Amino acid sequence: MISASSLPSVVWRKSSYSSSNGGDCLEVADGFLGVVPVRDSKDPHGPVLVFPAGGWVSFLSLVKGGEFSAF
């Protein structure tokens, strides 16, 4: 796992699935070959998870298909 501070020039964008009330906010960074960095917007200097691009695409397909229920 890496920290967001080790990626100072990265442009983060909020996931379209994040709530608009400032709660569950996930941010992703585009432009990395073969991987997708992901972080919690409430902790911008905290850890960054880096997923293989193919795994991220599969995960998004499952989310969009309703495979995960809300808590």
Image (spheres, rainbow, N blue to C red):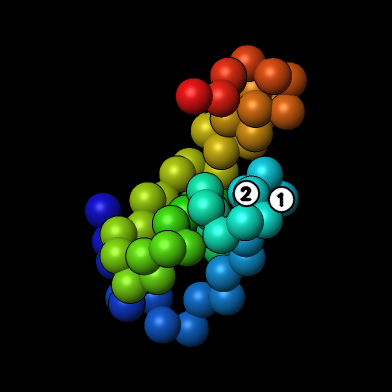
For image coordinates 57% across by 69% down, the residue present is: 12
Q: Residue furthest bottom?
A: 9
- Left or right: 70 in relation to 50: right
Q: Is residue 28 visible?
A: no
- Left or right: 2 in relation to 32: left
| Quadrant in the picture for residue 7 | bottom left
Q: Residue furthest top?
A: 67
Q: Which mark is residue 7?
A: none
Q: Nearer the viewer, residue 41 or 54?
A: 41
At which x and y percent is residue 43? 36, 65
At which x and y percent is residue 36? 52, 52
At which x and y percent is residue 40? 43, 57
The CA distance from mark 2 to mark 1 is 6 Å
For image coordinates 63% across by 16% down, the residue present is: 67
Q: Is residue 63 above or below residue 7?
A: above
Residue type indicated by callout 1: Ser
Helix, strand or loop at disc 2? Answer: loop
Residue type indicated by callout 2: Ser
Q: Are marks 2 and 1 in contact (CB under 8 Å)?
A: yes
The residue labelled by disc 1 is: 16
Q: Is residue 3 visible?
A: yes
The residue labelled by disc 2 is: 18
Helix, strand or loop at disc 1? Answer: loop
Q: Nearer the viewer, residue 34 or 71?
A: 71
Q: Is residue 4 above or below residue 40?
A: below
Bin the neighbour count of mark 1 within 10 Å (Cα to Cα): few under 14, some 14-19, many 20 and up.
few
For image coordinates 58% across by 19% down, the residue present is: 69
